[in-house]
């Protein structure tokens, strides 16, 4: 297992519904261990196993859910 962490600024997080959407989009992905969504700071932090999933894949899932993550 090779745990890594990625944090994205996600300015379009506006409410608890957004938080739930993000958790749904990433929560079932094989290799994702932890998801933290900070509504006030508008960030998404994901701890994941880089042997099972890549940060770029997670970013694409966030985009598919309607968000605009940036580094």
Image (cartoon, rainbow, N blue to C red):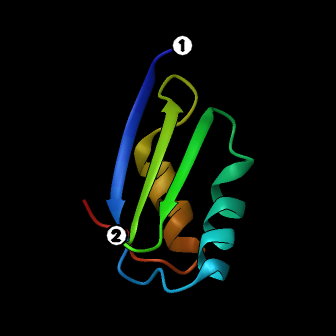
Question: Dot 2: what SS?
Answer: loop
For label 2, the residue is 41
Left or right: 49 as drawn, with respect to 24: left
Q: Measured along the vertical axis of the image, is residue 33 above or below residue 24?
A: above
Left or right: 28 as drawn, with respect to 47: right
Q: Residue at x 68, y 44 (%)?
A: 29
Residue 47 location in percent, x, y? 49, 37
Q: Earlier in the sequence, mark 2 or mark 1?
A: 1
Q: Measured along the vertical axis of the image, is residue 66 above or below residue 41?
A: below
Residue 30 location in percent, x, y? 69, 36
Q: Quadrant of the N terminus?
A: top right
Taking depth in this image into account, of 27 and 50 the one nearest to the observer is 27
Q: Residue furthest front?
A: 40
For label 1, the residue is 1
Q: Quadrant of residue 42?
A: bottom left
Eye-nearest disc, 2 or 1: 2
Q: Quadrant of the C terminus?
A: bottom left
Q: Residue furthest top?
A: 1
Residue 49 location in percent, x, y? 53, 27
Q: Measured along the vertical axis of the image, is residue 20 above or below residue 8?
A: below
Left or right: 54 as drawn, with respect to 33: left
Q: Residue at x 49, y 86 (%)?
A: 14
How busy is the neighbourhood of tag 2: few (under 14 within 10 Å), some, or many (20 plus)? few
Residue 51 is labelled as none
Question: Dot 1: what SS?
Answer: loop
Q: Measured along the vertical axis of the image, is residue 60 above or below residue 14?
A: above
Left or right: 28 as drawn, with respect to 61: right
Q: Quadrant of residue 68?
A: bottom left
Give the alpha-carbon distance from disc 2 to disc 1, as whole Å. Answer: 29 Å
Q: Residue at x 47, y 28 (%)?
A: 50
Q: Residue at x 35, y 51 (%)?
A: 7
Residue 57 location in percent, x, y? 50, 50
């Amino acid at each position: 297992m090779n745990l890594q962490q990625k944090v994205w600024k996600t300015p379009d997080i506006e409410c608890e519904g957004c938080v739930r959407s993000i958790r749904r989009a990433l929560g079932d992905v094989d290799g994702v261990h932890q998801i933290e969504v900070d509504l006030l700071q508008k960030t998404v932090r994901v701890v994941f196993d880089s042997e099972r999933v890549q940060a770029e894949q997670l970013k694409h899932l966030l985009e598919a859910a309607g968000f605009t993550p940036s580094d």
